[in-house]
Amino acid sequence: MATNQYHLEIENLTKTFSRRIVFKNINYKYEKNGIYGISGFNGAGKSTLVKTIANIITPTRGVVAHINDNSLIPNDELHNYIGFLSPYIVFYEEFTAMENIFHFAKIRNVELDIDYVRSLFMQLGIEDRKNDQLKTYSSGMKQRFKLVFALAHHPKLVILDEPTSNLDEKGKESFYQIIREVSKNSIILIASNESTDLALCSSILHLEEYKK
Amino acid sequence: MKNKYIIGGGIVVVFLSLMVYLFTQSNIQYENDFTKIMQKGKTVRATGKWIKERNYITDPMTKNVTFFMRDNNGVEMKVLYKGTMPNNFEIAQSIVVTGQFREGTFHARDILTKCPSKYQDQKSANS
Amino acid sequence: MIRSMWALFKKDLQSEIRTRYAINSLGMFIIVTVSVILFSLGSEKLAQNLTGGLFWVVVFFTAMSGLSRAFVSEEERGTVMTLHLIARPTVILGGKLFFNLGLIFLMNSVTFLLFSGFFETFVFKSPDIFLLVFIFGNIGIAVAATIIAAIIAKASGKATLYPVLSFPILLPLMLIVIDLTKTSLEGTTYTDAGIELSFLACYDIVMLVISYLLFDFIWKD
């Protein structure tokens, strides 16, 4: 595969909600493709940190630099470089899984890699339900579909916030397999406290260290 | 990114000031020279006096009222008005009609009357 | 970017066809208001200068009851973050604006047809000028309604705030539009209506540019 052109640099990142410090002065570089972890106790700010990295929340201070081809990616173009999975994401329940994916690709204005999406559905075991409306999905199936949403557009940076909640053993296994495969071509950040999730990671950022 | 706000702000300022300018223009102007009204055909408020001698005629079918007005220079103009006449029309010192002049007649959509005020009378009586 | 906006519009359209939320509530609203006017009239004829005003009253409140859905529905369902992740703010604004434009032109054409059908006095001597007023007025209402909907959705969807916030912003537009409708019922010329028509066009442009500039700040927390 080609050399990794995309990388991520976090400089002096600080986020406070009024007086409460969520995290302070995080400096971290993600330069090579691979799986990296973010851990912290409940309420430590894992979700806030990954949302800040994904440009959904503006940081109080500091910079998240997404660099591609040695130049900074402008905020307005960032969304197609990032794949995001989070418990907070909700899809359009009146559409089927495939319709959701189609609409998202059109809105992103990217060519949909239909074979890849189909193989993801297959590996996650929801292939036979891909033309059912999402309101008929169980929470575990929705979790699997979220992974399809996060990966469908071949993002350079994949952020997985608590990826394996609501999943059974089989589901976890297929998640890990897909994540390992994807990590060859992109940077993957996993925010989680599950020991099996963090076992995949080559390095782990502990949020407790950035509280003061 | 900064350019967006400069250009956008510029457009807003230009069009806002254009709006303010247009707003000052849109108020219908008073005009007491009937010759000008007849030439331009714009919507104006024509001020003048009702010519009592030529009375006013109400068409019983269409309820259109026709009467004649005279300005300070003595120019006369035929006025057509749809609707009921104001009560104090006959005793009015001067009247203001809002409308437009076309095809030899001033089509009024509104009539205002200026009545001799009690206080003015007292004043003139005192002096 | 226009392509993405169009895709978002198509997504909203398909969702609307499935749920029929806005169409149903707007359609009911129009039918109810027009029939209330009809009942209160009885066998009397509606004075011509009133029809214009009543028409825009119906239009204003239809817009208020339906156009806020664009953003409030996303906020209610919790899909705002999903939108954040797939498109830049301008695309979201554009897509939602397309949808509201479509909705308002559809609804107001229906209202117009009902008015022309039921009220004999709702006949225009200058239909060409009214057409312009109709187009500019609808665009202005759609743009203002869209950006206000975005603000309202952030205020945790307080729908009652919507008419309250919209009224002062739409007031200049409504005044001009009602006046122009009245004069085009009676018959007017482009020279007479020119100033007010260009005022409307300016209003639309200013609202559009302000929405574009402000939306980034409204959309991001």
Image (cartoon, coloured by chain):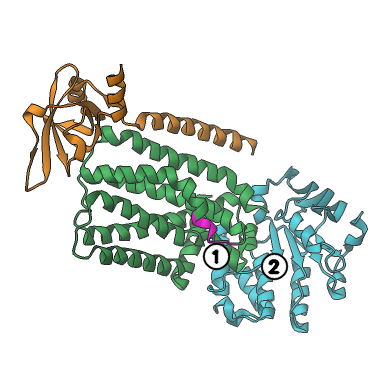
Q: Check disc 1 and give the amino acid type.
A: Ser
- Kind of residue at badge 2: Tyr
Determine the CA span between mark 2 and mark 1: 16 Å
Please report the residue visible at 76 percent of the width from the left and 43 percent of the height from the top: A70
* Of B59 and C85, the residue lying toward us: B59
Q: How many marks?
A: 2
- In the figure, C159 relative to B72: above or below? below
Q: In the image, residue C19 lies at what x, y percent?
A: 47, 72
- In this figure, which residue is indicated by the disc labeled 2? A88
Residue C133, image x, y percentages: 33, 45
B72 relative to A73 in the view: left or right = left
Chain identity for the colour green used in the image: C
Callout 1: few (<14), some (14-19), or many (20+) C-alpha neighbours within 10 Å? Answer: some
- Residue at 45% in and 47% down: C170
Viewer-proximal residue among C185 and C45: C45
Which residues lie in the magenta part? C157-163
